[in-house]
Amino acid sequence: MLGAALLAAPALAQAAPKVVVIGGGFGGAAAARALHRLGVSVTLVERDATYLSCPFSNAVIAGLREMEAQRFGYDGLRREGIAVVHQAARTVEDRRVVLADGDALPFDRLVMAPGIALHPDAIPGLDTEAMPHAWRAGPQTLLLRRQLEAMEDGGLVVLSAPANPYRCPPGPYERASLIAHYLKTHKPRSKLILLDAKDAFSKQKLFEEAWAALYPGLLEWVPLSSGGKVVEVDAAARVVRTEFGEHQAAVANIIPPQSAGRIAQAAGLTDRSGWCAVDPVSFESRQRPGIHLIGDAIIAGAMPKSAFAAHAQALVCAEAVAALLRGEAPAPPKLINTCYSLVEPGYGISIAGVYQPKDGLLADVPGAGGTSALGAPPAVRAAEAGYAEDWFHTVTADAFG
Amino acid sequence: MRICVALSVMVALPAVAAPPPGASSCAGCHGGGGMPVLAGQPAEAIVAAMLGYKAGQGSPTVMDRIARGFTEAEIRAIAAWVSAPR
């Protein structure tokens, strides 16, 4: 048998190895393009015809940007020779992806960038049509924007941030900032309460510095220890109940708990936490060999669930997959993350980190990373707001062509 | 049969120079969207800038925080890779 296999090998050697990528967001689309550049035959499986970016969608909610600026298609990938299949993936069998219509795509290795699943049912009474989460860019983003536009001046906006981990750690605080900017400029008698299921958050000192300067008396942050955890809502009456009392909202934006995307669960790639454990060098699943995972769905240690991180992981993962397909061991990587947040137009702040594999996870490289300086002059804040735009243009071009 | 598949896969991919640790992440920002494009720049200029940021020189907003995550040898390898025209 071994002899026959060796003899047969040269005849098969012409075929490029097949990799299927599931999920066409920042991570999946970038992984598909990087693998293609490395000579791999790639099929991208993505349910939707176009992708709507979460980064900058808070600006859409606040009326500072239109949704079409968030939309990216897959024609760039197709032009390069990447097969794009617009179907949901139903499950992953042994070396084949089963699609919603029953077709199956065989693979030598699989890369999954499944993103997140949202769990509004974890909050009793929550109806996301009445209290949108807007945590996946799309109709929910526009619903929340319309609710804010329809609100009378003097209304109370209640925003709730979940416990860790969740997609985009600074996201709820950027959103609170930009909604506060909308209220300040359009409905100045209104107020925003940010209920938080935790006592500390990303870029906290920078956000608090900005809030004190820009939105005094308008934006109030309520940490867990002061009654920030939402325990129940009455969606129809727009009442939000916490451990300490209740708030009568005019608009409520409840961001629910999250886990790895549905297909990761269906394929048996999640652990008891609901997220996916991976090897920090190859991004190969700890649960199923031959399947690699990147982006918001994974347990990445110190590396946050951000679009920048998903893109950085995609490029490292693609190199690792190509190395493994050549029969080589992937080299230990280093990865970078940089996340910008806007607190008002022209006022940006950032957090950055450098990561390396350590003890089976991605750990911070000591001495690197951190946030923008407190008390920095307006020119620095304006520069960082500009860099956020530059990053968005660059990363979306790299992911979608 | 598994051996057969593995062999066929191994020989079909061209060997290419993999990016050194950290280099691929640069593409998140440096690719033509507004921040400096690195491809085609002299590697020595990139090394000098990064070593300066690492030492606290200049007035970068984020590159000092990133440069501190790399050794001089890593910076030299990254600069050689990202400066190559592509």
Image (cartoon, grey):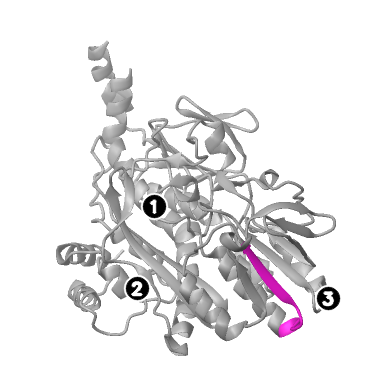
Distance from disc 1 to disc 3, alpha carbons, whole Å, reads 44 Å
Q: Residues within 10 Å of mark 1 (few under 14, many from 20)?
A: many
Residue behind mark 3 = A152
- Residue A226 at x, y percent in the picture: 60, 63
Q: Earlier in the sequence, mark 1 or mark 3?
A: 3
The quadrant of the image that shows the C terminus of chain B is bottom left
Q: Which circle marks residue B37 in the picture?
A: 2
* Figure quadrant of residue A304: bottom left
Q: Nearer the viewer, residue A106 or A335?
A: A335
Numbered disc 3: secondary structure: loop
Q: Nearer the viewer, mark 3 or mark 2?
A: 3
At 58% from the left edge and 59% from the top edge, which residue is drawn?
A224
State the image coordinates of residue A86 (x, y, percent, origin top left): 61, 43
Q: Which residues are magenta?
A: A185-195
Q: Which residue is mark 1?
A: A313
Q: Amino acid at mark 2?
A: Val
Front in this rendered view, residue A237 or A38: A237
On what subunit does the disc labeled 1 rest? A
Between circles 1 and 3, the one closer to the viewer is 3
Examine the structure image and report whether residue A163 is included in the region drawn in magenta: no
- In the rendered image, the residue lying farthest to the left is B73
